[in-house]
Image (tube, rainbow, N blue to C red):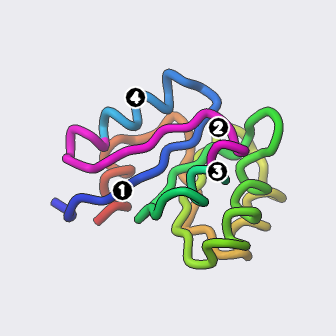
Amino acid sequence: MASAKHILVVDDDTDAADSLAELFEMEDHEVTVVYNGENAIAAFADKTFDMAFMDIMMPGKNGVDSFFEIRKNTPDAKVYFMTGFSASDLVDRALEEGAMGVLPKPLDPMEILAVLD
């Protein structure tokens, strides 16, 4: 098992966000959950995270635009995107700017835990 990490989960689907947080907490990770891009930016301004899992398609500021804002102040932020949509233009932009990868929804719990190792 990987050493304990501080993880940020960002998803406007509160059930999905809370379920993912529970998965990480069962593995003894510390988790912060927010439900929109604006709060993700604020969370990164307040805390240091080892990794973030961020939904791409959210109302207001989408995940990719939020990521770009986060990277201005935290250039080494490690972010995996999650999406159930085909948003290849957004995904390509995020990967070009340093996103760690993109995970398809519905999420595979074993795949999610594997990226933490």
- Where residue 110 appears, as percent x and y from the top left, is 30, 47
| Spatial CA span between label 2 and label 3 | 25 Å
Q: Which residue is mark 2?
A: 84
Quadrant of residue 22 within the rendered picture: top left
Q: How many marks?
A: 4
- Tell me which residue sits at (83%, 37%) in the image: 60
Of residues 86 and 93, the one drawn nearer to the viewer in this rendering: 93
**Dot 2: few (<14), some (14–19), or many (≥20) neighbours within 10 Å?**
few
Report the mark closest to the observer, 2 or 3. 3
Q: Which residues are magenta?
A: 24-40
Discs 4/1, front? 1
The residue that appears at 72% across and 44% down in the rendered structure is 38
Answer with mark 1 or mark 2, whichever residue precedes in sequence: 1
Tell me if residue 105 comes above or below residue 13 in the rendering. Answer: below
Q: Amino acid at mark 4?
A: Ser
The label number, if any, that marks residue 110 in the structure image: none
- Magenta span contains residue 34: yes
Q: Which residue is mark 3?
A: 42
Q: From mark 1 to mark 2, how far is it between C-alphas?
A: 25 Å
Could you tell me which quadrant the C terminus lies in? bottom left
Residue 78 x, y percent position in the rendering: 52, 68
Q: Measuring 31% from the left and 43% from the top, which residue is drawn there?
A: 24
Inspect the image, locate mark 1, and give the three-letter code of the amino acid beneath it.
Answer: His
Q: Amino acid at mark 3?
A: Ala
CB under 8 Å between discs 1 and 2? no
| Contact between labelled residues 4 and 2, with CB atoms less than 8 Å apart | no
Secondary structure, mark 3, is helix
Which residue bears the numbered disc 4? Answer: 19
| Furthest residue in direction top, as rendered | 15
Which residue is nearer to you in this view: 45 or 50? 45
Is 34 drawn above or below residue 98 in the view shown? above
